[in-house]
Image (cartoon, rainbow, N blue to C red):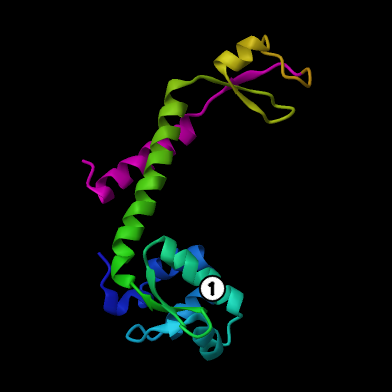
Amino acid sequence: MVEETDVLDNPAVRAYLIRMVGEEGLTLLEKFDRTVEKTDEQLAEETEINLNSVRNTLYTLYGKRLAQYRREKNQETGWLTYKWTLRLDNLNDALTEDMENAFDKLDARERYEDENDFYICNNCGIVYTFTDALALEFACNCGTQMEHYDNELLLNALKTRVAAMKVTLGKI
């Protein structure tokens, strides 16, 4: 679990956030006073980051529940102003959700690799399942004869990663 007070100092969290919002987004987060609501225009001015980049970062964070806004309507002009605050207290939930999604994909890929027998065209590099290779009579569309493909190395790597993720996610 990541503590909110030092969240941006954690190298793993920084890598996660960079992947999510980029270096510029991380710079915005570092300069964002978490105790004060700010408009996107104020943040762009204070951080000297392009307004569109600020907005993209905020919307991305909002999608992960790491930022929230309060909308104010100017009664004279009808303009809406969005005032943003960070919700980095939701970071553990966002990390867990992303890890669950990655786990589901890796788990499905592990099952696919485990349940299938594969053949490869050494000319094209295309890998076929046994069923697809059989339908093509073990001859690739390029005319090259397919050979059995040993996926043991990939399968073992997937099994290792899935097992580690199960432990991390408390699925064991």
Magenta-span inclusion, residue 112: no
Query: Front-most of 107 and 84?
Result: 84
Residue 137 figure quarter: top right
> Does residue 24 sit above or below 107 in this rendering?
below
Looking at this view, name the residue that lies furthest to the bottom.
46
Q: Quadrant of the N terminus?
A: bottom left
Is residue 87 shown left or right of residue 22? left
Residue 113: image location, x then y, percent: 46, 28
Question: Which amino acid does the dot numbered 1 rest on?
Answer: Arg
Range covered by the magenta-colored residues: 144-172
Is residue 159 shown left or right of residue 3? right
Residue at (25% x, 46% y) in the render: 167
Residue 65 figure quarter: bottom left
Residue 8: image location, x then y, percent: 38, 76
Q: Which residue is mark 1?
A: 55
Query: Front-most of 72 and 114?
Result: 72
Residue at (51% x, 74% y) in the render: 25
Residue 146: image location, x then y, percent: 67, 18
Say how many tags the image has: 1
Q: Quadrant of the C terminus?
A: top left
Residue at (43% x, 84% y) in the render: 38
Query: Alpha-carbon neighbours of circle 1 within 10 Å: few (<14), some, or many (≥20)?
Result: some
Q: Secondary structure at mark 1?
A: helix
Residue 159: image location, x then y, percent: 37, 36
Magenta-span inclusion, residue 156: yes
Looking at this view, name the residue that lies furthest to the right.
142
Query: Front-most of 153 and 19?
Result: 19
Query: Front-most of 31 and 6?
Result: 31
> Does residue 145 sit above or below 81 in this rendering?
above
Looking at this view, name the residue that lies furthest to the front.
76
> Does residue 164 sit above or below 94 in this rendering?
above
Majority secondary structure in the magenta region:
helix
